[in-house]
Image (cartoon, helix red, strand yellow):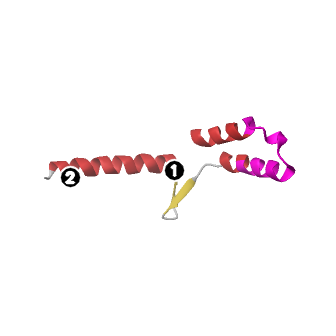
């Protein structure tokens, strides 16, 4: 969520008002899309955000590396 807020801020702070009408509409669409969180659907039941998925993958890899080092 933090990165999407940075995208919105960067779009707003750019000189969007000096652009042509089409580009202004694209900037608005980009800002609207950045407001929606990225959610991944697992097994039709569980919904998970990209940030949560990243934490799970990092934890899984750490556990895998620990087990691999233990059983060598």
In the picture provided, is 72 more to the left or to the right than 12?
left
Check disc 2 and report its element: helix, strand or loop.
Answer: helix
Dot 2 corresponds to which residue? 68
* Image vertical order of residue 15 relative to residue 30, above or below: above
Taking the view exactly as shown, the residue that stands out farthest to the bottom is: 43
Residue closest to the eye, 26 or 65: 26
Nearest the viewer among 67 and 22 is 22
17 or 35: nearer the viewer: 17
Label 1 close to label 2 by CB (< 8 Å): no
Is 43 in the magenta?
no
Q: Position of residue 27 (x, y in %)?
A: 75, 48
Element carrying mark 1? helix
Q: Is residue 41 visible?
A: yes
Say few, some or many: other residues with alpha carbon within 10 Å of mark 2 (under 14 / 14 to 19 / 20 or more).
few
| Residue range (magenta) | 12-30
Q: Residue furthest right?
A: 21
Image check: 47 left or right of 31? left
Does 28 appear in magenta?
Answer: yes
Q: Position of residue 48 (x, y in %)?
A: 51, 52
Q: Is 70 placed above or below 13 here?
A: below
Q: In the rendering, at what x and y percent does residue 58 appear?
A: 37, 47
Q: Residue at the location (80% across, 51% down)?
A: 23
Q: Position of residue 64 (x, y in %)?
A: 27, 52
Q: Residues within 10 Å of mark 1 (few under 14, many from 20)?
A: some
Which sits in the foreground, 23 or 59?
A: 23
Label 1: which residue? 50
Q: Which of the two discs, 1 and 2, labels the residue nearer the N terminus?
A: 1
């Amino acid at each position: 969520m933090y990165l999407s807020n940075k995208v919105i801020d960067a779009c707003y702070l750019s000189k969007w008002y000096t652009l042509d009408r089409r580009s202004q509409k694209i900037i608005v669409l980009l800002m609207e899309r950045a407001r929606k969180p990225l959610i991944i659907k697992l097994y039709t039941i569980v919904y998970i955000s990209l940030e949560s998925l990243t934490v799970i993958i990092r934890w899984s890899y750490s556990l895998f590396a620990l087990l691999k080092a233990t059983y060598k």
